[in-house]
Image: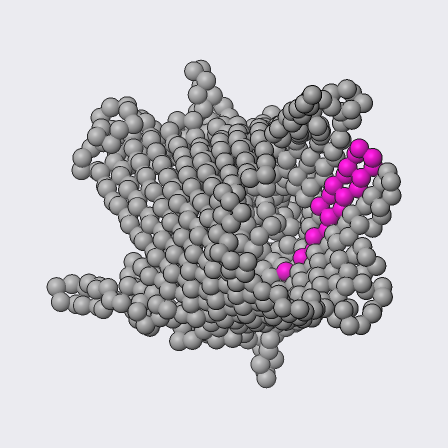
Amino acid sequence: MSIYYLRCVCPDIIVNNEVGFTDILRLPPVSKYHHFKVNSDGSFLLSEGKRVIDFQGNGYSVNLHPYKDFYDNTENILGNNSYFTNSVSVAESGEKYNIYLSAQNQNKGGVSTIVDADTKQNLLFNLGYKVSPKIEADITAQYSYANTPSSAVSSRSEGLLYSTLLIEPFINIAEKDNDGNYLYFPTGSDIPSNQWSNPLYELTTRGYSYITENLLLGGKLRYKITEYLSAEASVSLQNRYYNMEDYYPIGFKTITTDITKNNGSYALGTSRESTNNGQLQFNYNRKIRDFDWGTTLKWVYEASELNGFNASGYNLTAPVKKLNVTESRTRTISSSWSKTVNYGYFLNIKAGWKDKLFLDALGRLDQSSRFGNDVGTAFFPRVSLGYRLTEDIKLEPVTELKLRIAYGQAGSLPPFGAKDSKVNISSSGGVSYTQNDNTELKRAVTEETELGFDAVVANWLNIQFNYAFSNSKHDFINVPSFTPISGSAKIYDNLGSVKSNSLELELNGRVINKRNFSWNTGLTFSRVRSKITSLGDVPEYTENGYRRSVGATTSSIYGYSIFSNLSQLETNAEGFVTNAGDETKRIEDYTVNQFGVVVEKATLGTVAEAPVYYVNAATGNSKIIGDAQPDFTVGFTNTFNFGPISLYTVFDWKQGGEKFNETAQYLTYVFRSGFSDKTAAAGLPLNFTTLVFNASQVTDFWIENTTYLALRELSLTYKVPVNKLRIGQVLKNVDFSLIGRNLYTWTGFKGVNVDGRDQDGFNYPSYRVISAKLTLKF
């Protein structure tokens, strides 16, 4: 009699469904009042169709009034939006193979329900197969399709946040006509002296689409030649496709005549980015008694090519989205092409003795078509040493201590075309530029030395510490070809050098491990300092609001300064103030008003009260006024398990660092900021507020500290007892989670986004996300 056993090979199937909603995390304080005369019913008193400023008896202070009709456009338009994600994955493995297949569908609401949700679909397939004891192969295929209507929403002057904050709240920008269409000019739009376009009209009238596709194919083959020698070969092919279409219908309305839109316009753009990568690697590894060593020789080929096509025209002859219905004389057609080829050659040697002394040395030879022949090839070394001290010395309660030291160099690539950006100027027959090879463009190189250790304390606390100091030389910058000429003729040059040092600390471990309760915690600490030590042959300059000068940090903010303390005033030998006014006043001629602003004492409480600015003819009255670099950042995670319940939290803390709050500054321009209400309520003249606004120039009054503590994530997960519910034969695991992301931020910053170092200028706002997730494993 024979007995046969049938083994069921059942794949793991995991289904994830997450549904949630979002709302804006924070908005700047805005004005709740206006300073115009009103009728008895609270409506505006108009004279020849215009509002009249309601001055007090002194002739310069104003009276504030609440709006008769108040529409919170920001809350109404940028309110809650929903999103959902569905995914399914199938995994199967056997003695010779591993298979993984997954599919994901995502629907993410944007900044407003007026704009269609962004959608993305993704497919992924991985196959690993053991052909023989010596040969293994892997295959990867991935495809994604994304439609992002949110690309039509600008984060600045054409954006929803910009309009909803600046338009006075007596105007309802969500007002519709009898046909249900948003009005271009909602009721009351003709009353303010500053008129803004209604973004809801444009977003629902304009036709815009932006679609991207991504296809990635890859494969790897591993061959074990001998017991010690093996070879690997891999290849990947990736194509990204970008397709844009922009359509304004005939009759599109604008505040002022715009011949490129009013009679309709159409634009399209397509581009394809192809990236090919190939690698060949040989590995040799041996162990002789207490000595382990190995070497790796690798060759890498990378090629990327970008092809683009753009066309546009206006004055449509028919209401269709076609280029051939645009007026021929208005059409513009352009194309672009770029290609980069890189080669890399690597030799890596690793050695270890008694599992306590370690050496890792690497030499890398790079070649790139982005550089001219003189610097087309560069060599970058790296070496590291490690020593497990606890193998020789007992340091209880420290059960593991490994000391590390490393040194290395790395390079970066300049933008495409930099090597051809040198020009000659010719004046015969008019000024013209001729491009030449930029053979003097050097490679940007960063060399870094790192010291650190890894430790385990009491068999539960893991510690990793790193201290690094680096020097970056020859970074790439864009400068005018001929000073003071500016325009399209630009060349790339090398900056001098920047020195940096950084300190990083990571702690993690299981604090409590009981039968029904456990607690895991983790903490990260980081502090970075950078300073420009040389500009090379480049004069001092300002880039995106940051000053590039010797001795300054890489994040030094440059602009105008309003004095906030009398101690900031400087005097000459005769006692006259030299860095404010016209050098005819002494310190006792100034005072600080109730808003912490230095003013001339004689003007305090008068129509002439005005902020006192720093002056210095040598610098154009500008100086370094802030620094975006934080003192340090900390991350703190905790996981608590109570039987089938798990609680997970993530906190981020950033101490210090400053940011230019352009959002609040520009709101002050039209008296829409909270600062406008405060100065008016205090009786200061309107011109004081306007002078603090300072014509949108970067000014230290609008530089704010960005210290914050943020609750990044809070999630609660319940593991459903599938066996007790008698569904274990169908479902292996069922998890239900409630997840909150970006839940709350404690900060004194009054802009839109406290994160990041770039200025806050009506940016796309941060969102709070709350969702429920159900995970099923079959």
Q: Is residue 352 left or right of residue 234?
A: right
Foreground of the two, 177 or 281: 281
Residue at 50% across, 36% down: 124
Q: Is residue 550 left or right of residue 419?
A: right
**Quarter of the picture holding the C terminus:** top right
Foreground of the two, 69 or 446: 446
Q: Which residues are magenta?
A: 630-650
In the rendered image, which quarter is residue 704 located in?
Answer: bottom right
Residue 88 location, x and y as percent? 57, 29
Residue at 13% across, 67% down: 428
Residue 667 location, x and y as percent? 54, 45
**Quarter of the picture holding the N terminus:** top right
- 756 versus 393 height, above or below: above
Residue 385 location, x and y as percent? 63, 71
- Which secondary structure is most common in the magenta stretch? strand
In this orientation, does residue 749 appear?
A: yes
Q: Is residue 559 left or right of residue 13?
A: left
Q: Is residue 393 left or right of residue 101?
A: right
In the rendered image, which quarter is residue 28 located in?
Answer: top right
Foreground of the two, 89 or 525: 89
In the rendered image, which quarter is residue 431 located in?
Answer: bottom left
